[in-house]
Image (cartoon, rainbow, N blue to C red):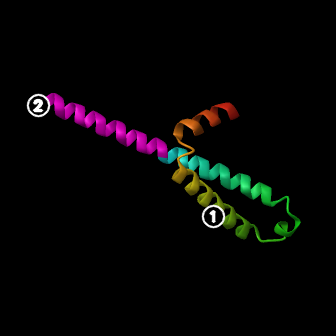
Amino acid sequence: MASNSIISSELQEESKEHSENELKVQQYLIEKMTVYLAKMSMHDVDLCAKPPSLLAVGAIYVALKICEQLKRKDLINSTVVTKLIQVSH
């Protein structure tokens, strides 16, 4: 009986760690996507004249929407992002 509770608590701990890792990966992806979009907006003459705060909000919003679509289609997961991070260094 005690071994079942130990196994159960270990599974809960692994599940919690997995959830935390997924959240970190998602936050990292959103951050990198936002920076990329903000940099790309500097290549447009009309956007360069806009206030930086407006560009920042726009980049964050678009990054969140892109990530939301990626998660819905399950094209990207923590394994893919981890591999991308390793290759980028």
Label 1 secondary element: helix
For the residues marked 1 and 2, what is the alpha-carbon distance in whole angstroms?
Answer: 50 Å
- Is residue 69 rendered magenta in the image? no
- Residue 1: numbered disc: 2
- Residue 34: numbered disc: none
Q: Amino acid at mark 2?
A: Met
Q: Which residues are magenta?
A: 1-22
Query: Hey, which quadrant is residue 9 in on the image?
Result: top left
- Residue 13 placed where, x, y %? 32, 38
Total marks placed: 2
Whether residue 30 is visible, yes or no, is yes
In the picture provided, is 66 more to the left or to the right than 19? right
- Residue 55 placed where, x, y %? 73, 66
Q: Quadrant of the C terminus?
A: top right
- Residue 78 placed where, x, y %? 52, 40
Label 2 secondary element: loop
Q: Quadrant of the N terminus?
A: top left
Closer to the N terminus: mark 1 or mark 2?
2
Decide: is 13 above or below 56.
above
- Residue 72 placed where, x, y %? 52, 53
Query: Hey, which quadrant is residue 58 in on the image?
Result: bottom right
Q: Residue under circle 1?
A: 61
- Is residue 9 rendered magenta in the image? yes
Q: Amino acid at mark 1?
A: Tyr
Q: Residue furthest top?
A: 3
Q: Residue at x 36, y 42 (%)?
A: 16
